[in-house]
Structure formats: structure tokens, C-alpha cells
Amino acid sequence: MTIQIQPPLPGAIEVQNIGLKFGVLTALEHINLSVESGRFIAIVGPSGCGKSSLLQIMGGLSRPSSGTILCGGVPMNGPDPNRTGIVFQDSSLYPWLTAQKNVEFPLTVKGCSRREREEAAKEALALVGLAGFENKYPHQLSGGMKQRVSIARGLVQDPPILMMDEPFAALDEQTRIVMGDELLRVWARTKKTLVFVTHSLTEAVYLADEVIVMSGRPGKIIDRIQVDLPRPRRADMMSSPAFNDLRIRIWEQIETPRSEQ
Amino acid sequence: MKISPRRMRWLLIIGFLAVWELAPRITGVPPVLIPTLSLTLISGFEQMDVFVENFFVTVREVFAAILISCLLGVSIGAILGGNRFLSRAMLPLASSLYAVPLVILYPLFTVWLGIGAPSKIAFGAFFGVFPTMLATASGVATIPRQFRVLAYSYRLNLFQETVRVLIPATIPTVLNGLRLGGALAIVGVIVSEMLASTSGIGYLISYYRTLLETPLVFFAIVFVIVLVTAFDMAMRKLENLVKHWMPEKSDGSETLSLSAG
């Protein structure tokens, strides 16, 4: 008997029965999730539900107590910038490097040639709308621009998966909306799998194909909501009834366990 | 007319020199208490060769003392700052030792090393090593966690992390420590010259004081000021190397940190 096995696409993510314990405290329990290549998924949940821990585990930055993560069909046994780019919340640019050099950083430590990394970084910066800002230092850039640099750095090695841990949490609301649109544009052009952790329900619904809702203590996935709003998304959709229904459905799930305590 | 801070500074200096020249004349204070500026300069220039010779004795000692306190302070500080257990065990001890008037130990230094250059250099280095060490330790200990997570996510080895992340991240605090430590090393050398020694600017100060040659004491003090200013300018040069990525440092804070030394 022959079994036809389809090799998984490099952008596919399989989260298999992930658990995370700190001593007696269970932070994550039975997390199962599969993400198709090229999808945009958002993970939301109350603070302390372990959504950031889950992202760190998915990116190979920390180890789960049990379970496996497969990115592109291969287990993650540590960070692998060739498979997953990671964008952090803030202060993750090195202040002593220019925007250009920050974006080049992953390539520099990999030992790429000067020409190769300069071209790749220039291209990545242009993609996030920062052409002309290559030689600025982080302190000369606004919060939104810094996050654009972080995103460019996440993209510079062209990994099939990009993971973002509350990337816009430190930004003011207008900048957040602009950055959301920027991210959607970049995503549409690069066709990466995007995993986006946020505490903003509006942001989650606006950006994602699918919203993963988590509950806290222990962190579990309690719902997966398909967002079938048409693309490209536009800011005026946020006031549509369909959008609000989705948001309220998520909110109720997050709220209920808390009121039962 | 608008006065810039820079012009104001020069006006203050000129004003001070004018008061120095005029006040003793007007009030009739005898030169043995406060000699005028002109008398100080005239008496001093007559002994110029003595001053130059002793000045360079002091400069050499200060240079050696700063070099030693810098090497020791930075390396011990880096070890302490990088190791939580050690820093918890040692830093409180170092901080309280820091409050001991170190000059009480100078007699011991002369017993061990005589009254020549070695004891003065050792004492100056001893003076300077604590702030350099404490600043380096706190610089290493307060490297943002995110910098290291990022280094981990790009799979830097320890050498790459040290060169590309840890050293640049601690440079600003280390420079602050050097400024403080260097100023204290100067204090240490000159104090030891004044206490028990046969050469150096500090020695001249106490020597001419016993002879009641007050104008020459003042002239020696001018040399000390020249030395301190030269040190300040050298530090400024060093700080300018990293200033372009450090927005928060201004002229004012630098002067403050110097006066603290």
C-alpha cells in the first residue's frame, strides 16, 4: 500500500498539543492549531492568558513543557530566522545601529556579503515605506517608523512565516491603524503566513483571516473565528454590523470566564 | 542682546579672573592669603621649569592610574554585572566600601610601595576603580532583555553577542563610569602627592604651602585645573564617538557628572 503524502508548504504551521508549566502553574494546556500557508491569523485573549508565551514557543524562542511545533513540516528546536521572522513589541532595535544596519543585522551575523545584505535591507526598508530613512538612528525615528524597521528586519531573510508579538501595542491609535493597513499591504505583496498576537479585538478582526481566542489560567484555545470580511480591508468596515458582530462574539468569550470567577 | 549659554560661560570665567585680580587689591588682603592673578602668574613663570617637570610627573601617574582603574574596573564590573549571583553577593559590599573615605588607606600604600610613583599610581587607580566597576556592572546588568532575546532569535554565539550586542549596549554607562572614575583617579594621585611624596603637582602645593609661598600654591592649583580640563576634553572626544546614537545626553549632564566626581 502506498500512501500519498503531500509535503507541507514552508509557510504551514502545526501546533501539536503544546503545554507549558512553571512549577505548579499551568500557563498553556492542550494547544492545538494548524495554520495554512499564507494565512493571517490573530491570537487574542485576556492579559496573562499565555498568548505571548505561545508565540515565543511557536517561534522557537522558548521551549514548551510538552508538545511539538512544526513550521513547514519541520520541528522547531530553537529559533530559526530562515523559517520564522519575529517582530517584537518595542525597544528591539539596536540604538547604535542605523535603520539600514538594524535590518542588515540578521544577514550580517549570518555572514552574508556586504552587497547582498545592503541590497536586501534596502529592498525590505522600501517595502515598509522607509526608503530614504536608511541612515537614521532609531532615536531619530517615530514609534511607527521604528516598528516598520522591525518589520523590515523580520522580512529581510525572506522567511515564509512572520510572527508578531503585540507589535503595535506601544503606538497611538492613528498610527496603529496606519500600521495595520501597511502590514496588510506588505502581507498581500509577500504572501507570508502571519501570526499576530494582540490585545486589541478591533485590530484582530480588522487584520486577520482567522482570530484565535484564548482564555487564561490555564491558557487554552476556546474559539477559532473565521473573519469573512472581504479584502482589501478598509477602515470604514470597522463600523459595519458584520465587523461588530465578530468583535462582540470575541468579547463575550473573553469576558465570560472572568465574570464566573 | 541675547546671551548664548556658551558666551555666558566665557563671561563667567572672565569675570572670575577679573575678581581674582581686583578683589585682593581693593580689599587689601595680603598676598600670602590671596595673591592676585598677576602676582600668581609672575611668580609661577619664574619657576616654570619646576612646574613643568612636576606637572608631567603627575600626568604620567594620572595616566597610569586611569588606565589601571579602567582595565580593572571594566573587567571586574563586566563579570559582576553579567553574573547575578556574584553581583548580589558583592555589589552591596562594593557600594558600602565606596562610602569609606579611601584616603585613610593611603598610609598603608606608602608602607607597601614606598612614596614614589608606584604608591601614587596604585592609590589613584584604587580611587578610580570603584565607580568604573559599579557603572560597568550596572551597565551590563541593565542591558534590555529584548536586546538579548533578539540576539538569541538570530542565533548569535557568545562571541558575536559580546561584540555586537553586549559591548555596544554598555558603552554609554561605561563612559559615565570612566568619567567619574577618571576624575577620582586624578583626586587620588594628587591627594597622595600632597600627603607623602617628593614630586608632582600635589607635592608642589603642599611644599610651597609650608614655605608660605602662596602665589606658587595658586599657580600649582592652576595646573591641576589644566589637568582636569584636559581630562574632560579627552572624555568629551570619547563620548562624541557614540553621541550620534545617544540623544539624551546634553552638555549640562556631562558637567554635572564631572562635578559629582
Image (spheres, coloured by chain):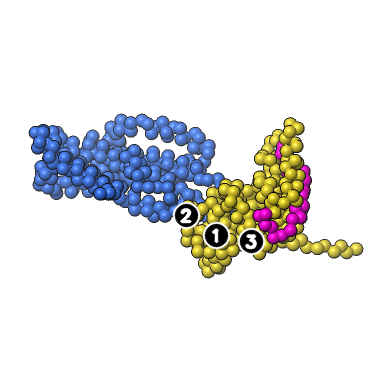
Chain colours: A yellow, B blue
Q: Secondary structure at mark 3?
A: helix
Q: Is residue B182 above or below residue B90?
A: below
The residue under label 1 is A103
Check if mark 2 and mark 3 are on a common chain.
yes
Q: CA distance from mark 2 to mark 3?
A: 23 Å
Numbered mark located on residue B186 in the image: none
Q: Secondary structure at mark 2?
A: helix
Disc 2 sits on a residue from what chain? Answer: A
Question: Marks 3 and 2: in contact by CB < 8 Å?
Answer: no
The residue mark sitting in front, 1 or 3, is 3
Name the residue located 66 percent from the left edge and 55 percent from the top edge. Answer: A235
Question: Marks 1 and 2: in contact by CB < 8 Å?
Answer: no
Question: Which class describes the residues within 10 Å of circle 3: few (<14), some (14-19), or many (20+)?
Answer: some
Q: CA distance from mark 1 to mark 3?
A: 16 Å
Q: Is residue B72 left or right of residue B117?
A: right
Name the residue located 77 percent from the left edge and 48 percent from the top edge. Answer: A224
Is residue A149 visible in the rendered structure shown here? yes
The residue mark sitting in front, 2 or 1, is 2
Q: Position of residue B128 (x, y in %)?
A: 35, 41
Q: Which residues are magenta?
A: A212-236
The residue under label 2 is A140
Mark 1 belongs to which amino acid?
Val
